Image (cartoon, rainbow, N blue to C red):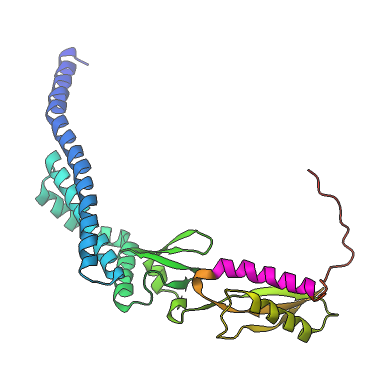
Amino acid sequence: MDPEKLQEYLDNFIDWAVSFAPKLLAAILILFVGFFIVKKLSLLIKKGLESAKLDREVSEFLSSLITNALKIVVILIAAGIIGVEMTALVGLLAAAGFAVGMALQGFLGNFASGLTILFFKPYRIDDWVKVSDHFGRVKSIQIFNTTLETPNDKTLVIPNGQVTDNIITNFSTKGNIRLELQVTMPYAESFPKVKSVIEEALSRSQYILSEPKAQIGIETYDSHNIVIAVRPYINPDDYWDATFEVYGQIKQAFSENDVKAAYSEGVELGPIGK
């Protein structure tokens, strides 16, 4: 390559870099400062919506919507500083609108489902719900998803589209949920006796509700024992505490009343290595 041409290209690149660098730095600064301001504004907006006595679900939904809209505005301002023409950008977005809509149809569906949840209120924040076999307390309802906190402290983020496409069980509307526990008894034991022992154990628990009454019955016949279903009712907040306590109380009651355990025959036991 001709050295003069190479020098010319290098000089042009340097001129372009010198002229473009300040715009790029300004755009980065706008993004940094803009997102910081949006974060502060979102807190003020959230407090303002809460002081307006709106439902918690509505205030969080609107706060999330406004925050995302402000972020888009900041991005557009930064693009304008770099030199992207707004009219050209709008035209490009309009031309690509169909393709973008097809690509984002899942997001749009989740947004529409979020509006459905917001207005029809199948559940509220802090309600205990079961959605698509996932059980937990509703922590937040966002534009595109709902966040659940499970009894074992896991956080589930469920797209709103999946929420509205499934059966929603809201346990908080009645104020209680039913534990689904299982215990076993050998065939030689008397079921009325074992049922009475289990009822006594449930009466000792501080978490078991007296109404509705707990259900206790034979669920199935296993190869070595009888499986008994124990279905007491509790407050949703006591899910794991009640589960552990009830199992412990039943174990203690079995021991006190000499209820035998069923063991499979022909199993050889050995030591456990370190």
Relative to 173, 248 lies left or right: right
Percent coordinates x, y for residue 97 in the rendering = 22, 59
68 drawn magenta: no
Of 112 and 183, which appears nearest the observer?
183
Point 73% across, 84% down: residue: 196
Q: In the image, is residue 119 above or below residue 17?
A: below
Point 49% across, 64% down: residue: 150
Relative to 203, 211 lies left or right: left
Q: In the image, is residue 209 above or below residue 161?
A: below
Q: Could you tell me which quadrant the C terminus lies in?
A: top right
Point 25% across, 61% down: residue: 63
Residue 245 is at least partly visible in this image: yes
Residue 83 is at least partly visible in this image: no
Q: In the image, is residue 45 above or below residue 173?
A: above
Percent coordinates x, y for residue 208 in the rendering = 58, 77
In the image as oriented, which residue stretches furthest toward the top? 3
Which residues lie in the magenta part? 239-256
Quadrant in the picture for residue 242: bottom right
